[in-house]
């Protein structure tokens, strides 16, 4: 049935879901958003996916909380902004006085703008005096940022989505773009239909895997030996770009000595794939040059997540797939502004612009009129550990449902229960607020404020206010500003609005200096963009690397995860998203899209379902070493026998009752992608 919607005006802005960063025009009637249509943009080229196009009704959900509240026994008491802010400031002041500033942790948000994340980290460092500042990037692509920064010098994608059509081949690893980054997924699909070659490395038979020239479906947890085996093939079969290596790469001889132990024939059985297929994948990647590697959380959310990305970078260095269009190592960031949140300094170890304290500490301290805290900060997972140990007393979380999102709910519960103060700033009373919140500060949505987001390929784009915020909801930057003033730091936080905050960011971040609001009004730009005449940099590393003229190959030994199957837990559980929902479901569960995928499911191969006597669409009990849940079964040919797959969008932390506390060795991202489980009929 055709529905006609009367629109009073359209406002251009950026999608709030995934980090593709599609541009859209949002139609309003009165104070309501009533329609969304795609806007002309080099990112989405006139397309939007089902989420960007239709999943906006959360904005006017009756569950929206539009006034501040303070916990009152088992319930909540509506209060004025003055009371909520005075209460919060007094509590923070008392905790600092009793336990020191490091007893508080602040979490920025992928949902918030760059400007707001910048202000959140400035608040932590300047007002509170702690480097305990982090964001949800910790649990997804911090391993990518760490690997790229360490080996090449910039903790972000090397190439832009503009390059997709220039690639001769794609290497898609641990990512399902047609569901999770749908507009990019569609462009990859089209490029493949137009002749580009495709290698997909994923334990599941995803839509792109069905189109692939080679689909490697490894045992989860085996990325490092698998990527090493591809590197061994490149060297053994002399599929190298010798000119590139001669000019830009160091350490080939040592690496060649190391990598012989990972010849495909030696590691194929451990990886659960054939040596011939590993070799075929390596050959296609080398021959397709320029070959574009895009990877997702199937690479990063592992014990060796950071090292998995490093082994991918090795492949690009060996084949000269860096510094040229259509190539590169490109993490597919999950959330709209997760790249920006961390890049604005919501990371205990870095300052705005992803700069180290050595690079920018003196500049920031001078601009902020305060010395920077010298003690190492805790990241999100370390904050949770410190809470469990009684060392952290307060957490302030912006647009982030900690309880629902972190692995191993039992441990998260124990930790959050120990906190004296949990400040939740969000659109809705999320699960963290319901279970642990002390004070709720109502935030404006992306449709109710101005600012910028940074997408997955380093492109900075404007968001614009479309409708007024409901009731007393306020933008995050306003709330931070008010709390800073109550804690004695009005000066330095007295910005007139997002543009003034952004101008301070640009003054402190040389690679972002050229990204003025005046330019962003008409175009979107990739950083580095050091001055206002600079066109931006869609392709990094064209002549050298920030680490030097040469990048060094990394010899990474395989370390199997301790999370292994046994007789009690014989299946491996993988977790991931679906097209119609988004992450913790805070937004998408409150839209009509939720009807298309109303509940989390457990996908199982037909052979396993038959063997276990389980029928499609019946409830099954899933038990891990850490917890137990009941989910409806979905028999699916996408998953391999011996593995099961579950989504995690429900308003109950179902899947994370099962996941373990194993973390990436370098940056502590949880190992969401490997959990040993058993599955039985729920009625048994
Ligand atoms: Fe939004 Fe991502 Fe869909 Fe684009 S692909 S409309 S950014 S969810």
Image (cartoon, rainbow, N blue to C red):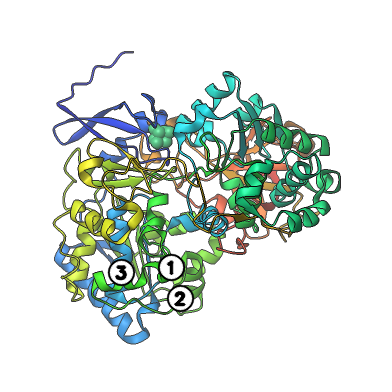
Residue 628 in the image: state x and y as whole percent.
62, 54
* Residue at 20 percent of width and 43 percent of height: 518
- Residue to which mark 1 is pinned: 348
- Residue to which mark 3 is pinned: 364
Discs 3, 2 touching: Cβ within 8 Å? no
- Relative placement, left or right, of 585 versus 278 is left
Residue 419 is at least partly visible in this image = yes
Residue 72 is at least partly visible in this image = no
Question: Splitting the image into 4 quarters, where does residue 457 fall?
Answer: top left
Label 1 residue SS: loop
- Relative placement, left or right, of 374 versus 247 is left
* Residue at 39 percent of width and 72 percent of height: 131
Considering only vertical position in the picture, is 212 above or below 533?
above
Residue 422 in the image: state x and y as whole percent.
35, 67
* Residue at 73 percent of width and 60 percent of height: 559
Label 2 residue SS: loop
Considering only vertical position in the picture, is 375 above or below 23?
below
Mark nearer the N terminus (2 vs 1): 1
Mark nearer the N terminus (3 vs 2): 3
Discs 2, 1 touching: Cβ within 8 Å? yes
* Residue at 51 percent of width and 64 percent of height: 412
Real-space CA distance between mark 3 and mark 2, rounded to the nearest whole angstrom = 17 Å
**In front: label 1 or label 3:** 3
**In front: label 3 or label 2:** 3
Residue 268 in the image: state x and y as whole percent.
82, 44
| 126 and 578: which is toward the camera | 126
Real-space CA distance between mark 2 and mark 1, rounded to the nearest whole angstrom = 7 Å
| Label 3: how many Cα within 10 Å (few below 14, some 14–19, many 20+) | many
Q: Quadrant of the N terminus?
A: top left
- Residue to which mark 2 is pinned: 376
Label 3 residue SS: helix
Real-space CA distance between mark 1 and mark 3, rounded to the nearest whole angstrom = 15 Å
């Amino acid at each position: 049935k055709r529905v006609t919607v009367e629109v009073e005006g359209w406002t251009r802005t950026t999608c709030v879901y995934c980090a593709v960063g599609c541009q859209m025009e949002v139609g309003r009637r009165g104070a309501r958003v009533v329609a969304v249509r795609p806007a002309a943009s080099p990112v989405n080229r006139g397309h939007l996916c089902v989420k960007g196009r239709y999943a906006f009704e959360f904005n006017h959900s009756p569950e929206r909380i539009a006034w501040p509240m303070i916990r009152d026994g088992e319930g909540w008491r509506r209060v004025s902004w003055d009371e909520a802010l005075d209460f919060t400031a007094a509590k923070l002041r008392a905790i600092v006085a009793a336990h020191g500033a490091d007893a508080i942790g602040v979490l920025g948000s992928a949902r918030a703008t760059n400007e707001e994340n910048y202000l959140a980290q400035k608040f932590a460092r300047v007002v509170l005096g702690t480097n305990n500042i982090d964001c949800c990037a910790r649990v997804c692509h911090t391993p990518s940022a760490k690997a790229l920064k360490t080996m090449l010098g910039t903790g972000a994608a090397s190439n832009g989505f503009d390059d997709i059509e220039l690639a001769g081949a794609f290497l898609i690893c641990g990512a399902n773009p047609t569901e999770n980054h749908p507009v990019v997924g569609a462009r990859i699909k089209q490029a493949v239909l137009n002749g580009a070659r495709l290698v997909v490395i994923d334990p599941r038979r995803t839509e792109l895997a069905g189109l692939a020239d080679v689909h490697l479906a490894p045992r989860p947890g085996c990325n490092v030996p698998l990527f090493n085996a591809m590197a061994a093939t490149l060297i053994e079969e002399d599929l190298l770009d010798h000119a590139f290596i001669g000019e830009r790469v160091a350490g080939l001889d040592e690496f060649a000595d190391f990598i012989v132990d990972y010849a495909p024939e030696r590691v194929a059985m451990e990886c659960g794939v054939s040596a011939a297929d590993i070799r075929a994948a390596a050959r296609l990647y080398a021959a397709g040059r320029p070959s574009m590697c895009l990877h997702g959380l199937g690479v990063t959310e592992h014990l060796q997540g950071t090292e998995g990305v490093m082994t991918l970078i090795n492949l690009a260095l060996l084949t000269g797939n860096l510094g040229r269009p259509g190539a590169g190592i490109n993490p597919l960031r999950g959330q709209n502004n997760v790249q920006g949140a961390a890049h604005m300094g919501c990371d205990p170890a870095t300052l705005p612009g992803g700069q180290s304290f050595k690079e920018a500490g003196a500049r920031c301290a001078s601009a902020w009129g305060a010395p920077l805290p010298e003690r190492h900060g805790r990241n999100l997972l370390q904050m949770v550990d410190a809470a469990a140990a009684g060392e952290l007393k307060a957490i302030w979380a912006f647009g982030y449902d900690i309880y629902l999102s972190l692995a191993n709910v039992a441990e998260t519960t124990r930790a959050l229960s120990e906190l004296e103060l949990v400040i939740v700033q969000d659109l809705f009373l999320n699960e963290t607020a319901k279970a642990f919140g002390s004070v709720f500060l109502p935030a404006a949505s992306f449709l109710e404020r101005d600012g910028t987001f940074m997408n997955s390929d380093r492109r900075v784009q404007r968001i614009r206010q479309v409708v007024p915020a409901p009731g007393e909801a306020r933008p995050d930057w306003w709330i931070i500003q008010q709390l800073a003033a109550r804690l004695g730091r009005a000066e330095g936080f007295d910005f007139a609005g997002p543009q003034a905050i952004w101008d301070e960011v640009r003054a402190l971040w040389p690679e972002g200096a050229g990204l003025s609001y005046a330019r962003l009004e008409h175009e979107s730009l990739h950083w580095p963009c050091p001055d206002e005449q600079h066109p931006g940099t869609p392709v990094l590393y064209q002549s050298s690397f920030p680490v030097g003229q040469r990048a060094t190959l990394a010899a990474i030994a395989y370390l199997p995860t301790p999370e292994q199957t046994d007789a009690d837990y014989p299946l491996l559980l993988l977790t991931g998203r679906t097209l119609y929902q988004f992450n913790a479901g805070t937004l998408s569960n409150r839209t009509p899209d939720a009807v298309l995928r109303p509940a989390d499911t457990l996908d199982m191969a037909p052979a396993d379902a038959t063997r276990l006597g389980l029928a499609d669409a019946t409830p099954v009990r899933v038990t891990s070493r850490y917890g137990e849940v009941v989910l409806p079964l979905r028999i699916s040919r996408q998953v391999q026998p011996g593995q099961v797959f579950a989504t995690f969008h429900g308003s109950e932390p179902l899947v994370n009752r099962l996941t373990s506390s194993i973390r990436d060795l370098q940056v502590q991202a949880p190992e969401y992608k490997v959990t040993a489980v058993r599955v039985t009929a729920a009625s048994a």
